[in-house]
Image (cartoon, helix red, strand yellow):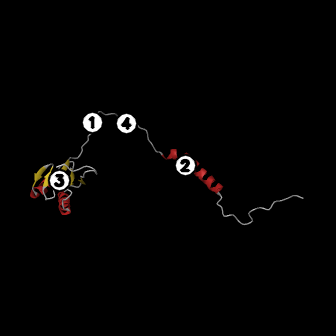
Amino acid sequence: MAYHPQLKYDTPRSEINMIPLIDVMLVLLIIFIIAAPLLTHAVKIDLPVADSATVNMKPETIQLGIKADGQFLWNGESVEETELEAMMQEAASREPLPELHLQADATTPYEFVARTMARASRAGLEKIGFVSKPDGQTQTQ
């Protein structure tokens, strides 16, 4: 008589069989390894060589400072509010279009900054950036 030990698990097991999943992943890996070189469509051509300098037209930057009392500084020079729009329109007519860098005092009311941005936008200056000091640097006067 042969002895057949009783199996421990008489109830169905609720474990995921990982073998089919691993097989599918390996097949997909092989397919991608084979297909990846086929996806690059490169056409090799011999281009003529010409001696020329690259044209690097960097746009001019305009530094516009706004003090807390409402005074404007155009590239470091004090300007009146009435002259500001004319200067902005003249700058907007240049090619390439200059960038406007706004530097406002920490205590400048937001109203001055918002009005200045609206004026610049109406004049045609599209590239407007804010300049600030990094943390840890004290303001020198």
Q: Identify the secondary structure beneath mark 3.
A: strand
- Residue 32, numbered circle: 2
Dots 3 and 1: beta carbons under 8 Å? Answer: no
Q: CA distance from mark 2 to mark 1?
A: 43 Å
Tell me the tag on residue 38: none
Residue occupying the far bottom of the picture: 11
Q: Type of residue at label 1?
A: Ala
Residue type, label 3: Gly
- For label 2, count other residues whose C-alpha is less than 10 Å away and answer few (under 14), some (14-19) or many (20+): few
Hey, which residue is sitting farthest right in the picture?
Answer: 1
Between 38 and 9, the one lying in front of the other is: 9
Foreground label between 2 and 3: 3
- At label 4, the amino acid type is Leu
**Secondary element at image label 4:** loop
Residue tagged 3: 65
Mark 2 near mark 1, Cβ–Cβ under 8 Å? no
Q: Earlier in the sequence, mark 3 or mark 4?
A: 4
**Percent from the top left, x then y, of residue 28?**
58, 51
Q: Cα distance, mark 3 to mark 1?
A: 36 Å
Residue type, numbered disc 2: Phe
What residue is at 11 percent from the left and 52 percent from the top?
78
As measured in the structure, the alpha-carbon distance from the residue carrying label 2 to the one carrying label 3 is 57 Å
Tag nearer the camera, 3 or 1: 3
